[in-house]
């Protein structure tokens, strides 16, 4: 699974690998999305699409007429209006949102369904367009990218938009980017910070300083990060203040920035109750007061991927997959499916699930619709990882096959390993980490499948994840523990006496998420449980 850790050390290596053939593979994935929606991938077509998302008065009037027809007395007229609205990107969601409040129940119902489907479709297209602009560094598209950000519905699409704007902007865009900092649309102002920072560098500091006093905490955070990267140490105090922000993701990113910049690791858990968070926040406050002015800092801080508090859990016995928010409340569910064993969250907010009894992989959108699948896999898949190039990596425990599939379902890579592979994880260096249950070891192999490193004599391992420091986090069934081993094979941390442990993930806050027969728990390095979901039958998990 693609566990979103902050790989500061490995990120450089991963980006270096991308400069070769990886971008080409990425582009095919995004081009396929555009082709599905009859959009060309050349620069002119991308610009035309983005500009089409900003409706004229004539377009708005036409949309309003169509929403009125959703309540027409004639069924065929209602259906025709529905079909036409479904083909139009969500360029003016306000019109449909108004219709959702109509006194006519038919208009309300149809508008809500159209709005939901259009938003999902538009997000998927925007993600592909933004990603292509970023990868190809298409300058001249900065304005349509920025104004399209107001339509992004998910964090992953907003992040892709920020990256596209930064790649597309030039020094000539600086003046209107400054104006964008005052936008009422938070996502546009936040994106402008990153773009200005790239094109002006330290000169943008005077533009960012006033943002530290704005009420928008996410805007304060990105401005403070940009200023810190230019050596303004006073912003460490801003990050300490943001540990108490109302928004969980802001608290998480503030703590993450403090840890990355200072190297200190106070046990701050962003979704603890305020009283529990206060102790760690006070430790940070004291450290910054005493050391912030002079201690060495690890700069620059990279944005990276941040866990958003979403937890996917496969319940193989109950035949369902659920997603929980940071409070443990269910926000998504897939029911009555046979053998769901492993899951992964994708950048555009989809869920990829492998079904070992059906020998299949499926990808689902927010509405629970299957949008991609591979059937009749040559073996029973026990792990799935969506790779950054859009391909999907699986391991089949009964046939020993580890296979990488392209989006078109063809095989990009395949090897066979004896010893019952229960898990496979693609590493930033292009190698693959394989967990061999019966062989009782974890092995790192190169592209030819030859071992380059291994960890032996484990207690029937079921999953393994390489950490940024080259340590490996392993779940061991017969040893009833989750253990962390260093590169020499020495155990440096463990959580013991777990009934049938199945999976574990090291989080960016230093805690460890563990699934077992008893459910799912999150534990601190000292073993204290800070979050749990005690439902029997959990197999694999993904916090993203």
Image (spheres, rainbow, N blue to C red):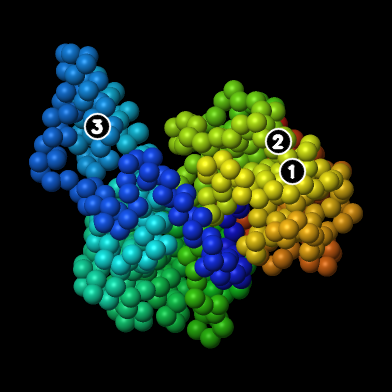
From the image, tell me which residue sits under label 2.
Answer: 378
Can the viewer see residue 461 in this picture? Answer: no
Q: Is residue 93 left or right of residue 455?
A: left
Under circle 2, the secondary element is loop
Q: Say above or below: 235 vs 388.
A: below
Q: Is residue 491 left or right of residue 154?
A: right
Separation of residues labelled 1 and 2 (CA atoms): 8 Å
Residue lying furthest bottom in this view? 294
Under circle 1, the secondary element is strand
First reached walking from the N terminus: tag 3 or tag 2: 3
User: Which x, y percent locates residue 223?
Assistant: 37, 69
> What label sits on residue 401 in the rendered view?
1
> Depth-wise, is mark 3 or mark 2 nearer the camera?
2
> Depth-wise, is mark 1 or mark 3 nearer the camera?
1
The residue at the point 73 percent across, 55 percent down is 433
Q: Say above or below: 536 vs 129.
A: above
Residue 452 or 172: which is nearer the viewer? Answer: 452
Residue 119 or 433: which is nearer the viewer? Answer: 433
First reached walking from the N terminus: tag 1 or tag 3: 3
Query: Which image quadrant is residue 533 in?
Result: top right
Under circle 3, the secondary element is helix
The residue at the point 26 percent across, 27 percent down is 83
Q: Is residue 286 left or right of residue 222?
A: right
């Amino acid at each position: 699974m693609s566990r979103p850790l902050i790989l500061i050390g490995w990120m450089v290596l991963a980006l270096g690998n991308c400069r070769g053939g990886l971008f080409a593979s990425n582009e095919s994935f995004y081009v396929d999305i555009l082709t599905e929606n009859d959009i060309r991938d050349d620069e002119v077509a991308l610009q035309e699409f983005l500009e089409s998302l900003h409706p004229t008065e004539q377009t708005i009037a036409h949309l309003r007429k169509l929403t009125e027809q959703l309540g027409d007395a004639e069924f065929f007229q209602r259906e025709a209006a529905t079909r036409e609205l479904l083909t139009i990107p969500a360029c003016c969601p306000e019109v449909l949102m108004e219709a959702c409040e109509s006194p006519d129940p038919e208009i309300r119902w149809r508008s809500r369904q159209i709005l939901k489907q259009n938003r999902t479709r538009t997000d998927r297209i925007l993600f592909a367009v933004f990603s292509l602009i970023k990868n190809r560094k298409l300058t001249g598209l900065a304005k349509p990218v920025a104004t399209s950000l107001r339509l992004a519905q998910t964090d992953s699409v907003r992040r892709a938009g920020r990256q596209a704007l930064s790649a597309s902007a030039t020094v000539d865009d600086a003046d209107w980017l400054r104006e964008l900092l005052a936008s009422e649309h938070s996502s546009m102002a936040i994106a402008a910070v990153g773009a200005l920072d790239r094109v002006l560098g330290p000169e943008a500091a005077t533009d960012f300083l006033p943002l530290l006093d704005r009420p928008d905490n996410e805007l304060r955070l990105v401005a403070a990060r940009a200023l810190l990267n230019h050596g303004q140490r006073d912003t460490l105090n801003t990050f300490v203040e943001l540990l108490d922000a109302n928004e969980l993701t802001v608290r998480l990113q503030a703590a993450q920035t403090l840890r990355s910049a200072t190297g200190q690791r106070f046990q701050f858990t962003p979704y603890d109750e305020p009283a529990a968070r206060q102790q760690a926040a006070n430790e940070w406050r004291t450290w910054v007061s005493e050391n912030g002015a002079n201690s060495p800092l690890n700069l620059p801080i990279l944005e990276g991927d941040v866990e958003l508090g979403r937890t996917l859990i496969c319940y193989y016995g109950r035949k369902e997959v659920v997603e929980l928010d940071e409070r443990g409340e269910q926000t998504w569910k897939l029911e009555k499916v046979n053998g769901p064993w492993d899951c992964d969250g994708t950048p555009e907010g989809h869920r990829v699930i492998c079904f070992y009894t059906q020998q299949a992989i499926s990808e689902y959108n927010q509405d629970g619709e299957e949008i991609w699948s591979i059937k009749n896999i040559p073996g029973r898949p026990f792990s799935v990882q969506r790779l950054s190039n859009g391909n999907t990596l699986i391991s089949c425990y009964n046939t020993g096959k580890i296979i990488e599939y392209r989006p078109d379902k063809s095989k990009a890579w395949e090897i066979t390993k004896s010893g019952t592979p229960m898990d496979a994880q693609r590493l930033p260096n292009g190698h693959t980490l394989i967990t061999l249950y019966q062989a009782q070891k974890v092995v790192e192999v190169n592209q030819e499948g030859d071992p380059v490193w291994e960890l032996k004599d484990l207690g029937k391992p079921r999953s393994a994840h390489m950490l940024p420091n080259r340590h490996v986090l392993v779940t061991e069934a017969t040893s009833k523990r989750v253990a962390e081993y260093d590169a020499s094979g020495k155990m440096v941390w463990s959580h013991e006496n777990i009934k049938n442990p199945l999976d574990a993930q090291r989080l960016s806050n230093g805690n460890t998420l563990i699934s077992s027969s008893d459910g799912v728990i999150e534990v601190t390095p000292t073993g204290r449980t800070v979050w749990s979901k005690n439902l029997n039958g959990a197999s694999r998990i993904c916090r993203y």
